[in-house]
Amino acid sequence: MLPAIAAMRFVPSVALGGLAYTAQQHLARAALPHAWQEQLQAKRFYVAPQPAEEAKPNGAAAAAAQVAASGPAPRHPSVSPPMPTGYLGFAANGRLPGAIDFHTVPSDVAAAMGTPAYDSDYLASVQPKHLRPERGYQKVGFKAVSLVRAVFDRMTGYSKDNMTEALWLRRMIFLETVAGVPGMVAGMLRHLKSLRRMERDNGWINTLLQEAENERMHLLTFLTLRDPGIAFRTMVILAQGVFFNAYFLAYLVSPRACHAAVGYLEEEAVKTYTHALKDIDEGKLWKDTPAPAIAVNYWRLPKDATMRDLILAIRADEASHSHVNHTFSVIRQDAPNPFHQGSNHIA
């Protein structure tokens, strides 16, 4: 029994730990349409801890160490060192400085599944992309998102010409309350499937839950700028109830169509945030407004970051989610996750 446990040290964990699946990436790329033969570049979220320098034994200690080294290897797994949380900049009282009090403790962000970080050149290069729907499930997903977008635009008063800061925040907050649902639902269903079938998930669960967590952080960031009223919160409750159950049932029927729909939904989000950036550059809103403290900590933005820097980072997040879900829609549902944990740049 113990040798078997020791051998488990060398079995790569797929569903846990978020290990990279570089050996299988070519399979995912081969299955993608030509326009989307892209992969995410590995970019770690945390600084790897440096191994401590061992003290050199001498005398009797050296002799004892030599005897121990010549003996049998340990028969139990070694304990992994804790993952460093790294430069998140919390205040001494555990609160994010300057943020609305959500009763947020450091673990809410420090223990989050991923804190994306981008370089300025990459942020500027992200632009709206569109995957032309060719397969049946892609067409279903695209049509569904087109219908939802039309209704959503009317509900939030979206216009390409007359968007104020208040209208932008209303739209962004409502959008993020919905965008955080698919990753959680898909991750939950795949988690239950793994338990039910007593088999590995091949690494999808962690990526899907990362997506949901990331969208939730978008929401918490925008809530530092506006506190919605009772009517707005009621609409969010109703929309979440309808969308959660609809997506839950749809995912049971066709996971491919659901991932395709999320891919197209995130395409629309990239368009929306690109429009917001255009308004910022034209001086219509948030001129020189500093980014909220919670955003500076989460995205590791410069201390003098502005709302423009924040919107650039969120747009990059949405582009990543779009690419991931389009990829999940075309590869086999039992295929290994082709993405590294911590990857966030699209090549």
Image (spheres, rainbow, N blue to C red):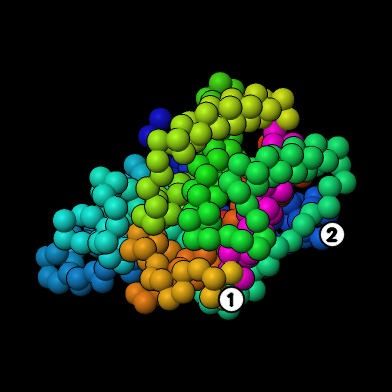
Picture coordinates of residue 31, whole percent (x, y): 80, 50
Mark 1 residue type: Glu
Q: Is residue 78 left or right of residue 211?
A: left
Mark 1 = which residue?
282
Main SS, magenta residues: helix
Q: Please tell me which residue is depicted at 58% across the width and 38% down the height of the picture.
A: 182
Read off the magenta span.
255-278
Mark 2 residue type: His
Task: Please tell me in which quadrant of the rendered image residue 303 appears.
Answer: bottom left
257 inside magenta stretch: yes
Q: In this figure, what is the number of numbered marks?
A: 2
Mark 2 = which residue?
34
Q: Please tell me which residue is depicted at 27% across the width and 65% down the height of the picture.
A: 89
Q: Please tell me which residue is depicted at 51% across the width and 34% down the height of the picture.
A: 235
Picture coordinates of residue 154, whole percent (x, y): 65, 44
- The answer to which of marks 2 and 1 sits earlier in the sequence is 2
- Give the CA separation, mark 2 to mark 1: 36 Å
Q: Residue 68: which disc?
A: none
- What secondary structure is found at the residue carrying circle 1? loop
Q: Nearer the viewer, residue 85 or 168?
A: 168
Circle 1 packing at 10 Å, graded few (<14), some (14-19), many (20+), is few
Q: Nearer the viewer, residue 113 or 19?
A: 113
Q: Is residue 238 left or right of residue 222?
A: right
Kindly tell me whether residue 12 is visible in this rendering: no
Q: Nearer the viewer, residue 229 or 335?
A: 229
Picture coordinates of residue 165, whole percent (x, y): 49, 60
Label 2 vs label 1, nearer the camera: 1
Task: Please tell me in which quadrant of the rendered image residue 178 appears.
Answer: top right
Picture coordinates of residue 119, whole percent (x, y): 52, 75
Quadrant the N terminus occupies = top left
100 inside magenta stretch: no
Q: Residue furthest front?
A: 162
